[in-house]
Structure formats: structure tokens, C-alpha cells
Image (cartoon, rainbow, N blue to C red):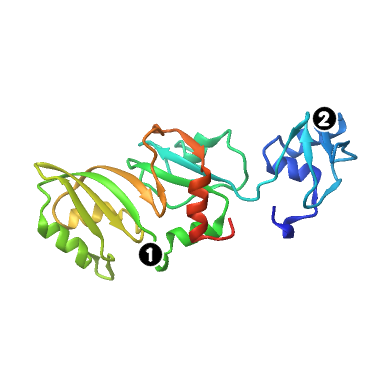
Amino acid sequence: MEQHIFPMRLDKYLADMSVGTRKEVKKMIRSGRVAVDDSPAAAPEQKITEGMKVCLDGQPVIYQRYVYYLLNKPAGILTATRDRHKKTVLDLLDEAAGKNLSPCGRLDLDTEGLLLITNNGQLIHRLLSPAGHVAKTYYARIRGRADEEDIRRFAAGIKLAEDFTAMPAQLLIRRADAISEVEVTIYEGKFHQVKNMFEAVGKPVLYLRRISMGPLKLPDDLAPGCWRPLNEQEMADLALLQPQL
């Protein structure tokens, strides 16, 4: 717990942990289902301070200011918090705890792969800022035979617009053929950047999947459309980038 967020109303504490809406948790409290330090909660407005134990139906409800989820984004899902017409990545996490969640970065509608979802805005900025030099690696299938000249051009930085040249990137050729398989690592995230870089060398992207971002890697056992909280090792690795998680 972080001291500066306390004291906090009991109903807000429970609502923040997605136990229910403010109206629902008030009913829970008044019906005697909530205990604070092993005593029945006094009222929804009861103040909770750091170190107090809150239980619902005898089960502890531990307050987490920040939450972190790893999602394997499928194609066809919009990377946004909400949209009137298309399903978003947050729609896939409708059972996840936590409020004010946002995707860390943007994957195109047809791009798959690793997406961090969190309510820690400082961490999102740290991971996305070009000044942070956080690596983002993608697996791609491209039309055309990838070669050493492509590796050289990516390493030199490709000019994508009159006023923008991409930072140097690493290109690894996994299979060179009429349809090549490659991995590319970039350190920024401009709109359609990976696709535009391959367009610039005359080899359009046919399929794109993000496989890592900073210390986070896309788990082999996380199917498209599925998500899970970060594990202890992933949290520890992220803490090296953002000590106050």
C-alpha cells in the first residue's frame, strides 16, 4: 500500500477493487458482510488507513493501487479504452480488477500480440517514451526476400516522412523466401511504424505480432484474446524500469 492514498472511505476501497459498484458495496457493508480488523464495518464512510484488514464474507480484500495485466491481443480488436462500434481490448478484460485501465501503446487493428494493460500512467509513459529506449520486438511475415541490405537500412534508420526518420532498429531474418519471416526491434512507436518501415524497403507486411516489450515477453501458453495478471518475476523485471510499482 502507498501511504499517500490513505485514509480512504471503505466503500471507495471496495469499489476500487471491483468488488461492486459504490451502490452495491454500500449494501454489502450495511448488511454486515464486510469486516474491518475483524469487527463488523461501521458504515460505508468508515475511514480505512494503511495496515487495516478489510474482509468481505470472511475473505481478505487487499488494496492494490496499480494493477497490471498481460494480454495477447487478437486481430480485429481495437486498442482503445472504449469505442461505439468496435470491440476494444478493455472489453476482453471485463472481469479484471482495477479502475482507469489503459493499454500501454497501440497495436493496429490487424496486429496481434503482447499488450500491457495497467492504470499506472507513469509506467506507460516510461515504456513508450523514445527517450526511454525501451525495446519493442515484433515477428512479421513480409512479401519479398529479406536480405542484408534490409538489415543495413534498418540499422541506419529509415526515413519515413519529410520530417521523420525512424531510430535505428535491429532486423533479424528468420527465413528468407518469397514470403520472409523476420523479427524487428524498435525503440519508439510511431503510427504504423513497423509497417511503414517495411513498405519503405519495398516489402509490405502480411502479418504482424508483437512478441516482447521491455522485459515482458509474450507467453507461449497465452492464447489470442486471453489475459492474466503479471507474475512475480515480470513485476520484478518491470520494477527495474519503474521502481515504484
Q: State the image quarter where residue 42 is shown.
A: top right
In this view, 7 is above or below 167: above
Q: Which residue lies furthest to the bottom in this view?
A: 163
- Residue 148 in the image, given as x and y percentages of width and height: 11, 57
Q: Which residue is drawn at 57% across and 50% down?
A: 119
In this view, 2 is above or below 219: below
Query: Helix, strand, or loop for circle 1?
Result: loop
Q: Is residue 102 left or right of residue 139?
A: right
Q: Which mark is residue 33?
A: 2
The three-letter amino acid code for the residue at tag 1 is His
Q: Residue 117 carries which label?
A: none
Precedes in sequence: disc 2 or disc 1: 2
- Residue 83 in the image, given as x and y percentages of width and height: 49, 41
Q: Which residue is drawn at 56% across and 47% down?
A: 101
Query: Helix, strand, or loop for circle 2?
Result: loop
Which residue does the numbered mark 1 point to in the structure image? 133
Q: Which residue is drawn at 71% across and 34% down?
A: 20
- Residue 142 in the image, given as x and y percentages of width and height: 18, 45
Q: Residue furthest right?
A: 42
The three-letter amino acid code for the residue at tag 2 is Arg
Q: State the image quarter where residue 245 is shown.
A: bottom right
Q: In this view, does 181 lie to the left or right of 102?
A: left
Q: In this view, does 23 lie to the left or right of 122?
A: right
In this view, 184 is above or below 42: below
Q: State the image quarter where residue 29 is shown.
A: top right
The one of 144 and 134 positioned closer to us in this rendering? 134
- Residue 2 in the image, given as x and y percentages of width and height: 69, 56
